[in-house]
Amino acid sequence: MKFGIMNLFPVSDGASDHQVLRETLDEIELADELGFDSVWLAEHHFSKYGILGSPVSFAMAVAERTRSITIGTAVLVLPLHDPLRLAEDIAALDVLSGGRVSIGVGRGYQPSEFAGFGIPLEESKIRYKETLDVLRLALSQENFSYHGEVLHYDDITTYPRPFTEGGPPILQGTVSPDSFRERGAAGEPIITSPNFTPLGVMQKNFALYRTAMQENGFDVASYDLPFMQQVWCGDGEDGLREAAQAALNYYRSVGKVIPGSEQAMERERAYYEAVAKNIELLTLEQTLTHGGNFGSAQQVIETIEMLRDQLGINHYIGWLRIPSLDRKAALKSMEEFADKVIPHFRAQEQVAPAAEAVAG
């Protein structure tokens, strides 16, 4: 089991943009020292919901400040990017970090971001597909040409070439059953963050992914299966409820940036209307029980073990720096997680090979 941390880069009341960027860099350096395996950086634009517009640029600073932690994006909004420039930047990061890069990508959903860049939201699907196609080609091929509906390139080679042969792994943000099935059939890595999704639904989705992989000759055991959720690890009812309230505040902020009925594409309108309604009705108690992983170290461990056993995940990404949660409380939670949760799973991993050796 690998363990990571997630960073959204929100600006809460009383904080400054500069403070958020510098403090987050310090927190990532601490995570590296504490033994976390990965850090994940979100891309957002034009609002204080998240102020990091260029995760790959920020990741350059992370690479210089850290020694072993893998640097991931969660996620790059591909329709907003020039794929060639993005490939060049990712390859440079891969070189400077010594191959410590994982690239999470997604289609995006915030109307203000697409409007700000002058890109119609209804073009997001085709732009996502073609940008992903070109990004893969640029990172894996010495020379390529590509002709799609939107993007056209002839005789292109990007530099620098990546440190990692074939380029860093690219993981696609995945939500719908069809996406789980399609990406499993193609052997494509995924990254998920299914807060409030019932366990039974998650089990079906992950089963679709694994079955499709197996049916098409892919070795499921060789894949990273990252799973992300909000986390608070500690003791005391006050701290627990403070963390859950911060998570609830975050979920309500999501309701302000998702497409409204007038903005959503027709095929997605019902989905976003349901999301907005669910957010509006969300309570603190529901957030505590279904909105993340909140509790003592033992409770957090039990939830992760359940997710591992029921879904087959092997890379748990804790959103420990919950937006609006007091920074000292978040750092204490991170240290508690590193001190008690990670060692528990590391010990299990050491016992398993020893048991196999004895049995052999």
Image (cartoon, grey):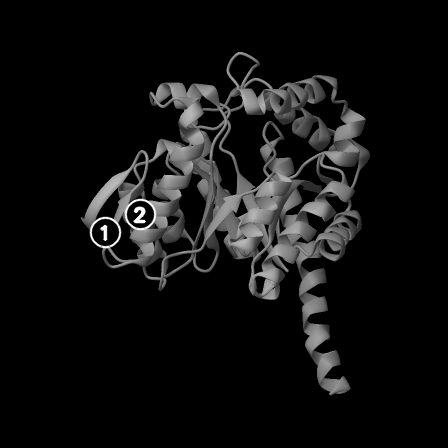
The image shows residue 258, relative to residue 302, as above or below, that is above
Q: Write down the quadrant of residue 176 in the picture.
A: top right
Image location of residue 319, percent across then percent down: 60, 41
Decide if residue 58 is in sight here. no
Q: CA distance from mark 1 to mark 2?
A: 7 Å
Image location of residue 278, percent across then percent down: 71, 22
CB within 8 Å, label 1 to label 2 = yes
Among numbered discs 1 and 2, the one appearing first in the sequence: 2
Q: Residue furthest left?
A: 155
From the viewer's perspective, tell me whether residue 172 is left or right of residue 61: right
Q: Nearer the viewer, residue 45 or 346?
A: 45
Disc on res. 55: none
Q: Residues within 10 Å of mark 2 (few under 14, many from 20)?
A: many
Q: Residue furthest top?
A: 262
Mark 2 residue element: helix
- The C terminus - image quarter: bottom right
Q: Nearer the viewer, residue 260 or 123?
A: 123
Image location of residue 48, percent across then percent down: 48, 22
Decide if residue 38 is in sight here. yes
Query: Which amino acid type is shown beneath numbered disc 1?
Result: Thr
Q: Residue at x 64, y 60 (%)?
A: 1
Query: Which amino acid type is shown beneath numbered disc 2?
Result: Ala
Q: Residue at x 77, y 33 (%)?
A: 288
Q: Residues within 10 Å of mark 1 (few under 14, many from 20)?
A: some
Disc on res. 158: 1
Image location of residue 167, percent across then percent down: 36, 57
Disc on res. 87: 2
Q: Write down the quadrant of residue 212 in the picture.
A: bottom right
Mark 1 residue element: loop
The image shows residue 185, relative to residue 117, as above or below, that is below
Q: Nearer the viewer, residue 118 or 320?
A: 118
From the viewer's perspective, tell me whether residue 308 is left or right of residue 116: right
